[in-house]
Amino acid sequence: MSSGHDAAFWADDEARLLDPARPHVVRDSKTPSGAVPISALRGPVISDALVRTFRGHGLDVRFVYTIDDYDPMDSQSMRLQEGMAEHMGKPFFAIPSPDPSVASDFAEYHATRFISLFARLGIVPEFHRMRDLYRSGALDHQIDLVLRNAETIRAIHKRIAHVEHAPGWLPISVICENCGRIGTTLATDYDGSTVAYACMPAYVEWAQGCGHHGRMSPFKGNSKLLWNEQWCAQWDHFGVTYEEGGKDLLTAGGSRDRSNAIYREVFGKEPPLGLAHEFFLFGGRKMASSKNVGAKAYELVNIYPPEITRFLMLRTHPKRHIEFDPAGMTLPRLVDEYDRSADAYLGDASTDLARTWRLAQVSPDPAPPPPYRARFGTVANWLQIPSITPEKEAEREKAAPLDDAELRDLHVRIELAKEWLERWAPEDAKFAVTPSLPPAAAALTPAQRRFLANVGAEIGRTADPEVMQERLYEIAKECGLVRAEGGVSRDAFAAIYIALFGKPNGPRAAWLILALDPDLVRSRFADASRDSVKV
RNA sequence: GGGCCAGUAGCUCAGCGGUAGAGCAGGGGACUCUUAAUCCCUUGGUCGUGGGUUCGAAUCCCUCCUGGCUCACCA
C-alpha cells in the first residue's frame, strides 16, 4: 500500500499479536503520589495509541486504568516536606489533601489532576480506584486465592527474583488498626478468614510502625495485596489481555516476570502480552547543571500543546529511549517535524510518519491538519517585532484569509512561541537592540556607512513600512550596494542589523526600523556611519 | 551480577538482506520590494570493532569496545 517496504508500524505489530476473535482489555495504572512529570506520560500515551490502533484493526477493546490509592507513601522527597513525615507509610487515600477545596484526600487530589491532564491529552480510559475495588470486596476472591497459595508465591519470589521472604510471610499489607499505616505491617497465619499482623517499627526504612499487633480480616478493604500479587488480581478481575510497561518493570527477573509466574502458577492463567518501552529521559544527564532551563518536567505538560506532547512520545519507537532537553532549538525542531508529519498525513496517510501524526491528535478521529500552518520559528520572529500583527502576517504569507482551524493553530503557536522565547530560545534567535553600538560595526564598509547615514536621515519621513522598504532599496542602490547582476546586495540589510544587533541578520528591515524609537535609530545609524569606530 | 537500548553525513535520526537516506546545519543560486521568508541546486558517510552466514549485510549470527538506562528494597 504505502511506499516500497512493508516494515510495519510498531503499533500494528502489537495489534497482530492479539486474537481478533475475542474481546481485549488493555490496562495501565498510576500511583497518585504527586504531580505528573512529562517523562511519566510516555506509558499512558503509548497505551492510548495502542488502544486506538487495536480498535482501528477492528478489535473489541476496553481500556482500564487503575488509580493505586491504596499504595503506601514511601517517597523520600515527600518525607522532607513539611507535615509529611508523620504520614510516611500510610496509604495515599488516608493522607490529608494539599487543598481540601479541590479534593478530600491526598490521593484524590493528585488523581483528579492527572485524570484531567489525561483528558486534555485525549487519554480517556475507564478509571478505577483501588479503594473502591478493595472496599467493595471485588478483589476478595483473589486475596483469598493469594493467601492460600502464599508458600507457592514465596517460592516464586525466591526462584525468579532471588528474594527470600521469611517462612509464614503473606503477600499482603493490612492497614494497622492503631496507626493507620499500611507500609509497616507484616501479616502471617491466614486461617481462611483472618490474618495475624504486626505493625513493625523497623520493617521498612522509610516509615516507622507503631508496634501494634493483632488479628483481623484481610477482606473488604482491610488490606491490600503486595505489588506483584495485586497486579495478578487486577489482571484476573478485569480479564486483562494486554499491558505495556516501562523497562524497569519488564526487565528479566523484574516485577513483571514475578507477576507472570504467579499468574500462571497460582491463577492458572496466561499473563497479558505487552511491549516494554524505554525511558523518556528529561534533560539528559546535564540537567542538574543547567538551571536556565526554567521549567520543571511537570510544567512542560501544561506548556506544550497536547498534540505536541503526544507527538514527542510517539515519534520515537517505544523500544528506543528518548533523551529530551527542552532548551535551545529543541522546540522549533520538534514543531517543524510535527508539521512534516502533518504534511505526510495530507499526502499518503498510510506512512509511519502520517500514522504518527494521526495518533498524536487529541481526537481518535481527527479532522485533517490545516494546509496552511505558520512555521514556529517564523511566528517567534513575528512576536519580536512590535509593529507586526501575527494574524495579518500569516494572512499575507498564506495570501488568503485564515479559516477557523488555521487561526486556532496560529494562536496555539503564538502562545508556545512566547514561552519558548522567554525560557529556552538561544540568544541568536532573539533580537535585542544592543545598548550601544556593537563592536561588529567596526567592520562596516564605507558604502554601508553611507547607506546607514542616508537611512538615518530618512527616519521620520514615513510611517508606512511598505514605503520605507521601497526607500531602503533605493538608498542601497544610490550607495552602490548592488550585486553584479543589478539587484540590491544583502550587505545593505546586513548593515542595519549589525548596527542594531551586532549580527548580520534580523527581521524585515523597514518594519523593524519603524517599530523602534526614531531617536535611537537615528543616533545609532549616525554612530555607525562615522569612519572612526573604536573596536 | 542479570536485563534493555544506542553507536549510520557537523547535529537529530530513518533505513533492518539487493548498488547509502531525510530534516536541520553548511555551500551556491533564484526571487530586479525582503531576511533567518519562499523556491531550486549542492558539499558531506569505507553505516563502532573483529569474525561468520550469503551470489550479495548498515540490515542476519557470534565476539569485543564505547555510551546510556534499568533490576536485584518498595511500588
Image: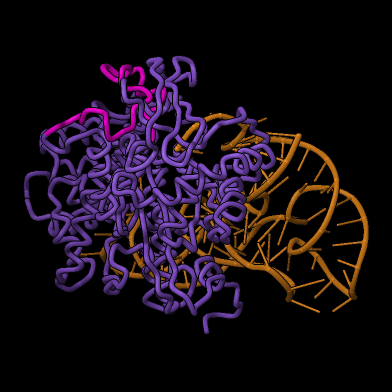
Chain colours: A purple, B orange
Pinpoint residue A464: horizontal percent, then vertical percent: 8, 55
Q: Residue at x 22, y 61 (%)?
A: A409
Pinpoint residue A182: horizontal percent, then vertical percent: 38, 29
Whether A378 is among the magenta residues is no
Q: Residue at x 40, y 70 (%)?
A: A61
Asked if residue A481 shows in the view, the reply is yes
Helix, strand or loop for the magenta stretch, by majority: loop
As displayed, is residue A354 above or below residue A160? below
Pinpoint residue A30: horizontal percent, then vertical percent: 38, 45
| Picture mark count | 0
> Which residue is more in the foreground, B36 or A439?
B36
Pinpoint residue B68: horizontal percent, then vertical percent: 60, 36
Whether A73 is among the magenta residues is yes
The stretch in magenta equals A71-100
> Which residue is more in the foreground, A59 or A410?
A59
Q: As drawn, which residue projects farthest toward the bottom?
A: A1
Asked if residue A489 shows in the view, the reply is no
As displayed, is residue A163 above or below residue B19? above
Q: Is residue A209 left or right of residue A123?
A: right
Q: Quadrant of the C terminus of chain A?
A: top left
Q: Is residue A210 left or right of residue A523?
A: right
Q: Is residue A284 left or right of residue A310?
A: right
Q: Residue at x 55, y 31 (%)?
A: A169
Q: Is residue A285 left or right of residue A427?
A: right
As displayed, is residue A475 above or below residue A102? below
Q: Residue at x 38, y 71 (%)?
A: A343
